[in-house]
Amino acid sequence: MGIAKIAAAVFLALSIGSAIGAQSPATLTPPVVQPARARAVTPLATPVSGVAPLVRADLEAWLDGYMPFALSRGNIAGAVVVVVKDGAVLLQKGYGVSDVARARPVDPETTLFRPGSVSKLVTWTAVMQLVEAGKLDLDRDVNSYLDFKIPPYKGRPVTLRNILTHTAGFEESVRYLIGNDPKKLMPLGDYARRALPARVFAPGTTPAYSNYATALAGHIVARASGMSFDDYVDRNIFRPIGMTSATFRQPLPGSLAARMSRGYALASQDPKPFEIVTPAPAGSLSASGADMGKFMIAHLANGRGLLRPETATAMHGTKLTLLPPLNRMALGFYEDDINGRRVVAHGGDTQYFHSNLALFLDEGVGLFVSVNSAGVNGSSGPLRSALFEGFADRYFPAPRAEPRVPAATAREHARAMVGTYTSSRGAFTNFVQVLGLFGQAKIGVDKDGALSVPAVTGLANQPRKWVEIAPYVWRDAASGERLAAKLEDGRVVRWSFDTVAPFTVYDRTPWYLDSSWLLPVAGGSLLIVLLTALAWPAGAISRRRYRSAHNLQGRALGVQRLVHGFSWATVVALGLWAYFITTAFAELHKLSGPLDWLLVTLQILTPVALIGLVALAAWNLWIGWRGDKGHFSRLWSVLLLLAALMLLWVAIGFDLIGFGTTY
């Protein structure tokens, strides 16, 4: 997972919205927050009976058969792949180019990539070093380390253990996320204070991925160590293990800047500016593939050079079990077990770089991949997923037992899952929550009564076939991905699936915020208001053409004109919201202030327009039903009031009415 998942969520949500009428970035994340596994459609797997030896010659031949094709098919400029084994580099190799215009090939030793949220593993390692030194305590209120106060949630504080396991309870924070102007980079301490999001879950109870929380941990590292975060990781992580081509600094130091790969949306398009990650400890690392290999070797060797063996063991093995049997968060790493092997991993995304690091703990093997382009339809995600799956299936295959729940019970359990769910990774107290209206995950049953989860698709975006293998635990027949649910009082209240379960769950959406009925009703309401607004100029044109007088006079005419005026104000307000959201999330640097003038304008205009429209629609209905208006006018006055009330409800329920520029 990574920083630019938010951006991906935005574009996915917008594309869905185009099909239904209007839209923006899902609960801040859509139901699928990163491409899921799909072994069945990759040609990389090897049967268990024909296990390939993990040696350089075989590995290089295998990668050479996959990577060039994958890059070309996905319109991706370049990539680096590093595999370490038994404390040494087995293979590190660049594919494609780091600069399309100059045809500069990727060099695994010298070319720098942006690993995105894989950066978090460095931050967590720094935290654990300071725990070893007695300067930090994983279970102490973090306010004791800060120069500002994080309010308690129902009397419960945030701890570093909560932060490392993404269970601090923070809602998503997107302000000051990614910029492109290094002159506007905010100091880490200022960011930690100014971007503080609301806490919406009790600590330790709900996985909710948080870039802000990781940045907060980085700020704590700086305060506890007495040096800047950048200086700390340079001296205590990069230098001890020889990572000479790695830095969190933004902009890049001159010695490294010339070696930085360009980032691309598509290899066929112009390169993008160097991304400035404001919550730097969460995702600002720039590093060569070779240096990421050194980091993997250190962790696979029980932290050698970085941590004491017992600390590394705790970091990799302390798992928070919230939704068994799915993958869990460790201390910073998350489980990504496959084929019966213990794997801890972390993915990472900026807008243009997409990466994954996986450690096969018992085999002493690490795999790192990073690409420098988003690719066609986000093909970078399936590329790295297929690479991980294929690598595991080729070198560490295992047969998979296929127990099944009786068919009648499976159909009953599938029906119990039916409903609408909201991701725990999202906004809940500010206007960004409206994006969740379009990103709620729907679960249904197919014609055979089997579970259907349209939002969780396979590698080629194909529907999955979910087979129940234990009560309320399903496995995708093709990929092996598991999905499981939590019940309370016999009712399904929460579910997730392996790929995201360590840091995201889906809870039942309250009926009054359920998009299943809210979206069509809100869409119809907006249409009624729009037609009411258009009736004003249409009526004026008609009267002028036919030289007829207005059929209303006095107070009734005044109220109708006000109704038309506030209908226009409502349409304009909602249109500006759509413009603000699409513009800000298409260019993430605009989330850091350039559009604040529009946000403040909307925060004033929206309640005035909607509350005014409700009041005037009610007044118009009262006048119409007391007067001599026709049946159609009376019916329309009722529909208009109901439409105004519905739009006001959406605005209140999804926080379009509110003030503040922290979101």
Image: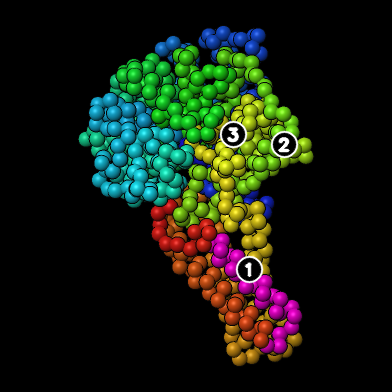
Instruction: Determine whether label 2 and label 3 are within 8 Å by CB.
Output: no
Question: Which mark is first along the chain, 1 or 3?
Answer: 3
| The residue positioned farthest toward the left in the image shown | 226
The residue sitting at 27% across, 48% down in the picture is 148
Measure the alpha-carbon separation of dots 2 and 1.
39 Å
Measure the alpha-carbon separation of dots 2 and 3.
15 Å
Question: Which mark is first along the chain, 1 or 2?
Answer: 2
Tell me if residue 643 comes above or below residue 347 in the rendering. below
Instruction: Determine whether label 2 and label 1 are within 8 Å by CB.
Output: no
Q: Residue 204, located in which quarter of the rendered image?
A: top left
Compared across the picture, whether 281 is left or right of 550 comes to left
| Front-most of residues 275 and 127 | 127
> Residue 46 at x, y = what percent?
64, 14
Check disc 2 and report its element: helix, strand or loop.
helix
Compared across the picture, whether 154 is left or right of 262 comes to left
Q: Type of residue at label 2?
A: Arg
Where is mark 1, residue-wise?
643
Magenta residues (range):
627-651
> Residue 75 at x, y = what percent?
60, 33
The question of residue 51 being in magenta is answered with: no
Question: Which mark is first along the chain, 3 or 2?
Answer: 2
The residue sitting at 41% across, 12% down in the picture is 87
Give the mark toward the camera: 3 or 1: 3
Where is mark 3, residue-wise?
484
Q: Residue 60, located in which quarter of the rendered image?
A: top right
